[in-house]
Image (cartoon, rainbow, N blue to C red):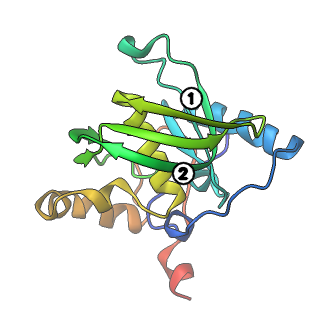
Amino acid sequence: MILPITIYSDDILRKKAKPLKGVDSEIEDLIGTMFESMRNASGIGLAAPQIGHSIRLLVLDISCMKEYSDAKPMTVINPHILSVRGTNMMEEGCLSIPGVQGDVTRPSVINLKYRDEHFDEKSGEFSGMLARVLQHEIDHLDGTLFVDRLLKRERRKVLPKLNDLSAGIVDASYPHTRTPLSELQG
């Protein structure tokens, strides 16, 4: 099943998601649906708030990228970044903000504690694209979008497109949804 991706200006994207207490058949189904929805939209990461669920769950799969073809898909539940080091800047985009890209500086290496799809506790050090995608998706769980991390002059450049998205002008090749601003303000 493919779920619509929540688009910029929907209030769920600005909420801090709630931790999961375990994995049941409903969450297992949601994880599968998230992978399907992400791949359908040609994404490499998807957080639960992006499909309307305010829970601390994300999926990612960067194996479609040539240099990461051996990378295994990941399910990450209740992530907690323990430490970071280094920095690098890279252009990012987001399924919830179609048509907008910008350079974001992030730590280049992260140490992460999380639970997997079986709710087993894991920890590990991640670098490169894996570290970047994890941080981008964890930001979603905290109500932060990559455009919030842009330098002011970069954010000014994308503001017209953000305004279009807020007004419901969305050009995306995948199913999407958003709560109109009038409903958010009402």
Determine whether the residue tagged by mark 2 lies in a helix, strand or loop.
Answer: strand
Task: Classify mark 2: residues with Cα within 10 Å, few (<14), some (14-19) or many (20+).
Answer: few
At 67% from the left and 57% from the top, the residue drawn is 55
Q: Where the N terminus falls, by quadrant?
A: top right
Residue 169 or 81: which is nearer the viewer?
A: 81
Q: On the image, which quarter does residue 126 sit in?
A: top left
Residue 53 or 85: which is nearer the viewer?
A: 85
Question: Residue 147, how many percent across, how many down?
Answer: 30, 57
Residue 44 or 170: which is nearer the viewer?
A: 44
Asked whether residue 40 is in view, the answer is: yes
Question: Residue 162, how many percent across, how many down?
Answer: 31, 62
Could you tell me how far apart the alpha carbons at marks 1 and 2 are, in whole angstroms? Answer: 25 Å
**Label 1 vs label 2, nearer the camera:** 2
At 42% from the left and 16% from the top, the residue drawn is 68
Task: Classify mark 1: residues with Cα within 10 Å, few (<14), some (14-19) or many (20+).
Answer: some
Q: Is residue 92 above or below residue 142?
A: above
At 28% from the left and 58% from the top, the residue drawn is 149
Q: On the image, which quarter does residue 91 sit in?
A: top left
Asked whether residue 43 is in view, the answer is: no
Q: Where the C terminus falls, by quadrant?
A: bottom right
Q: Earlier in the sequence, mark 1 or mark 2?
A: 1
- Kindly identify which residue carries mark 1: 39
At 42% from the left and 38% from the top, the residue drawn is 133
Q: Amino acid at mark 1?
A: Arg
Cβ atoms at labels 1 and 2 below 8 Å apart: no
- Kindly identify which residue carries mark 2: 80
